[in-house]
Image: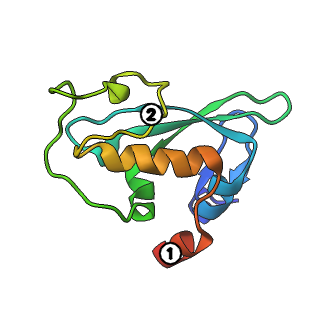
Amino acid sequence: MDLRDHYKNCSYCQKIWKTQEDLVHDLSLIVNGYQAGFDDPEEGLFLLTHENGSCGSTIGVKAGDFKHLYDGPEYKECKARGVGCPLYCLDVNNLQPCPNDCSMAWVRVVLQHLVNHEVPITKLTEHK
């Protein structure tokens, strides 16, 4: 299969996710972190572990690929490390939503969708 014919693949076991929808709904993918992109949150990486049989490979997916799943307010200012910041984005393994009006907050909401494999199919199909 030509690499351009699918959304993502596992470099270890060669599992292929043809679409973003396939990836989001695959219960063998466990979200285990977010590597923040402080200058540009869309460049941050969601870290997913493929727990399928003997595979335990970690796959990085750009947060920006999933921004269309967020429909809340967007904030311009990054408040990471500022007053009231819970520092969630500084802990790669922290998956909690952020209560701040920060440019990074949308990422934390999308993380919850991925963790729960509960992304509305309509959001995925609208994006195609």
- Residues 13 and 114: in front is 114
**On screen, residue 34 above or below 109:** above
- Which residue is farthest right? 53
Residue pictured at 71% horizontal, 52% vertical: 16
- Dot 1: element: loop
Which amino acid type corresponds to the residue marked 2 in the rendered image? Tyr
Residue pictured at 60% horizontal, 43% vertical: 115
Which amino acid type corresponds to the residue marked 1 in the rendered image? Lys
Which disc is residue 34 wearing?
2
Residue pictured at 41% horizontal, 43% vertical: 108
Earlier residue among tags 2 and 1: 2
Quarter of the figure that contains the N terminus: bottom right
What is the x, y in percent for residue 73?
27, 60
Q: How crowded is mark 1: few (under 14 residues within 10 Å), some or many (20 or more)?
A: few
- Residues 100 and 120: in front is 100
Q: How is the image coloured?
A: rainbow
Which disc is residue 128 wearing?
1
What is the x, y in percent for residue 103?
23, 46
- Are circles 2 and 1 on residues that touch, CB within 8 Å? no
Q: Tally the numbered discs.
A: 2
Q: In which quarter of the image is residue 38?
A: top left
Q: Quadrant of residue 30?
A: top right
**Image-based side of 23 in relation to 70, left or right:** right
Residue 19 visible here: no
Residue pictured at 41% horizontal, 64% vertical: 68
What is the x, y in percent for residue 126?
49, 78
